[in-house]
Image: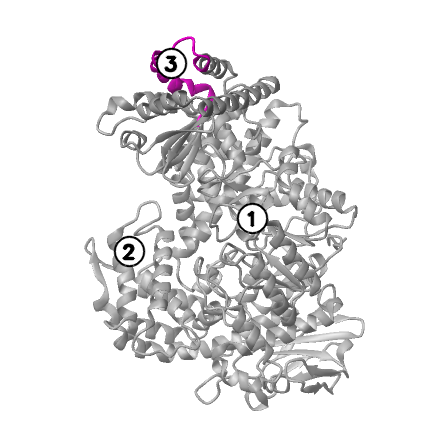
Amino acid sequence: MSSTPPRPRYVPVSTYRLQVHHQFPLTEAASVVPYLARLGVGACYTSPYFTAAAGSTHGYDVFNHNEINPELGGADAHRRFVSAIAAHGLGHIVDFVPNHMGVSAGGNAWWTDVLENGPSSPAAKFFDIDWAPVKAELHAKLLLPILGDQYGHVLERGELQLEFREGGLVLKYFEHELPVNPRQCPRVYRMAVEPLTAEAGADNPHVHEFLSILASLENMPAYTEQGPEKIAERQREKEVARTRLTRLAHDSPVVRRHIDEAVRVANGVPGQPGSFDALHALLEAQAYRLAYWRTASHEINYRRFFDVNTLAGLRVEEPDVFEATHALLGQLLANGSVQGLRVDHPDGLFDPRRYFEMLQELAARVTENLTPTYVVAEKILSGQERLPVTWQVHGTTGYDFLNVLNGIFVDASHGRRLRRIYSKLTGRMDAFDDVLYDSKQLIMSTAMSSELSVLAHMLDRIGEGNRKSRDFTMESLRDVTREVVACFPVYRTYVDESGWTPLDRSVVSQAIALARRRNPAMEASLYDFFREVVLPRSLEDATSDRPAGERRVGYPPADDKEARERLRFAMKLQQYTGPVQAKGLEDTAFYRYNVLLSVNEVGGDPSRLGRPVEEFHEANTHRAKEWPFDMLTTATHDTKVGEDVRARINVISEMPEEWGREVSRWMRINRTQRRLVDGEPAPDRADEYRLYQILLGSWPADLPLAHRAPQELIERISAYMLKAAREAKLHTSWLTTNQDYEDALTGYVQRILGPAGGPKFLPAFAPFQRRAAAIGVINSLAQVVLKLGSPGVPDFYQGTELWDLSLVDPDNRRPVDFATRAALLSGLAEQDPAALLREPQDGRIKMFVTHAGLHLRRELPHVFVGGDYLPLATEVTVRAEVVAFARVSGEDAIIAAVPRLAAGLVNDERSSPLGGECWKTSRIILPEALRSRTFRNVFTGEEARSTEAAGQAWLFVGQVFNTLPVALLRAV
């Protein structure tokens, strides 16, 4: 039985992603909509536009889910934006962030209330905070790691300053403004009582009012109170006192003057340590504990987005929290402003399955329509992992497609040779699995150590509750948790209250087996205990004939206290394995293992150099049957390099020996540009090897390789290499920078691309780069065509209709010149595609292919979204391969065909593999349903008719690739 999700009431035929921010607000986005409509786009798909941190360039640090960001133009600009979308017949999909909120610099009202009132705050339940952590000093406190130095040094330098404002105290620390527990404010105010009374007199009514206010503050419930009545009383009393004190300070300048003087005294005097005692005592009485930012990795007690202290995890699994964070989103769905959703980072959620149920329930309720809303999840699938069929979504955001697609343009037959060349030139011999294991261990011992401690403490409590496991020590339980997480093959499992699946069991078993193999000396019973806690046995384990995605009854009844503790541990563990995998894989191992950077992509596996065409067809066939509305991407705001950078770097796999010789020569030419750091040449050979790949992939298509690079390019490459080195965490890192190595690295880039070394290096680099770029054009056009034709919804990241030679963020979030793109599109209809191919530097050939393909999809949506998928066999008689498939719906049919691994067909005389002379007798075999049909090439207008003989029908490849090296053929 198919598990295909129900068809949503709206399905985009394609999407175009816009990054909105204060420099590209919603009014600017609205002005781009007419261009997108002409390009052929089906839906405008935006980054989050809810109120976020000031100056946010991405919108994922949301301060208020229920307000359109004023920096983007607010509600009025949003109305104009969605009106423009509707007027041009497009749909609208918005990116939504349920997992976390931004909590920096006092801009989040809920977080501010938690800081003021601790567990007693009505907003305390919104955030995933451990109010009873392992460290006793943090009981009922929130660790706030915002200080740039040790707390005592910061305090005694006078950097923490109180200020009286609007009837209360605030604590200022540079850009941060923190509330002060109102119950403790009298510690400061009482310093004003004696001098105030002496000046104004004990009988002064303002003095009486002041003392009355202080008494009310001192008698209000403590921030540790959590009973509903006490919480309500505290909220009421603090607001009444604030209002009274505001009025008093306004009505009595004398009272205000003495309060200000008390605040001045409390703020202390640098050089006089004792003068800070009162302020220290006040800060110790807060619901938060100020700390040096470096302590976060070991002691933080709130869940973060990965290791980002300014992004705090939400408990959106709680109905009240869900409703509070989704109110405006519900309105936008109800009034038709939004037709679809992209959900950010669902793997961070406590219970993703239940979240997507709640989301669809909300949409059904507000729209009064039970047909599902179109939802895609930013779920990173690893290896053969499949999207959970129990999620009420319509697919992922497309990284799985990206990696399978990219893989077919890597020559797998040269993988061993490439690794050998890499090892020889860099000295790096480690297998990728070992690099990943070490990287995850590093993350758990540094950036995410505190979360590991919490899990170990939870596991220890479970162990103590059972006589069979009470002898396991806290340290041993921490060790086993760390080892299993380091060996996790995917981002997370999906254990929940309804149990676990065979897929969950397979993942945990694989992780434990790998951990045992790496740590044979660790006591076996530890692994058995760990497995039993995460996946407790049940009577139904005996039945193994159920579908892999079906939920099993894995937990005893909810009234079993130990079972509840085990379930909570399993579900909290899942919120940890994902961030460790992301930080260890994407943000560490990908920057340490540089064999072929084009496969170091989100959701990718650098140990797999190349994928067979059969895997591509299998993935498309599965998607057509099970996830026909899945999103297909080749570039996002999170990809490691631009889609056309990957297309060029892939070429290395087709000529590894030539690449190895060239890199060796470049290293010799540039050896004098390296510098000694701690007795070793810097940059190291691995960083240098990475640099040459990046230069090969990102050199601007319209920029001649002269004797020096433009300064803008040098700065972009330098910034990328610096980020890569910090992410690798071998010579320098974000936490502990090594300035000498960083200077040597960026200086090296400056020297080899500038006047010092450019005249020697760039002429030597140019021939190979030009050839890779020429073949890269073919790869780039091929991946566009395959994305346009494959089952699912193709997504185009902003600006990628021209060459995308961007690097990792923030480089890929630079402004897009839409005016130039609109002008190029206006003149595109009159252009000869053959002429565009001969002069590919300006990218118009890519826009031409994209534009034609998008309009074809718009004309035949039933073929592309929901049509049958038929892989087509090919017989290629030259040194290249062809990928082809058909999409069929009734009498309508199209064929997508592209070359792959075609470097052997490109030379100085032939810049692109075209015509029968190039392809000889190579042919695409047609199925019975397409025999005797005539096809028109959507790009060139040329017609192709099948040839039939001996019971077969085919199209000659040279006929299909007569004018362009890619084709979308429409049956006529």
**Mark 3 or mark 1: which comes first in sequence?**
1
Q: Residue at x 66, y 41 (%)?
A: 327
Q: Is residue 147 left or right of residue 372?
A: left
In this rendered view, identify the residue nearer to me: 612 or 5.
5
> Residue 69: which disc?
1
In this rendered view, identify the residue nearer to me: 261 or 426.
261
Q: Does residue 741 lie above or below 526 as drawn? A: below
Identify the secondary structure beneath mark 1: loop
Identify the secondary structure beneath mark 2: helix
Q: Is residue 525 left or right of residue 890?
A: left
Q: Label 2 sits on what residue type?
A: Glu
Main SS of residues in magenta? helix
199 in the magenta segment = yes
Measured in 3D between alpha carbons, the distance from the residue under mark 2 to the one under mark 3, in whole angstroms, is 63 Å
From the viewer's perspective, is the residue at label 2 or at label 3 nearer? 3
The magenta span reads 180-207
Q: Label 1 sits on what residue type?
A: Asn
Colour pattern of the rendering: one colour
Q: Quadrant of residue 414?
A: bottom left
Q: Label 3 sits on what residue type?
A: Ala
**Mark 2 or mark 1: which comes first in sequence?**
1
Circles 3 and 1 in contact, beta carbons < 8 Å? no
> Residue 200: which disc?
3
**Mark 2 or mark 3: which comes first in sequence?**
3
> Residue 742: which disc?
2
Measured in 3D between alpha carbons, the distance from the residue under mark 3 to the one under mark 1, in whole angstroms, is 48 Å
- Residue 350 spot, x, y in % from top left: 59, 38
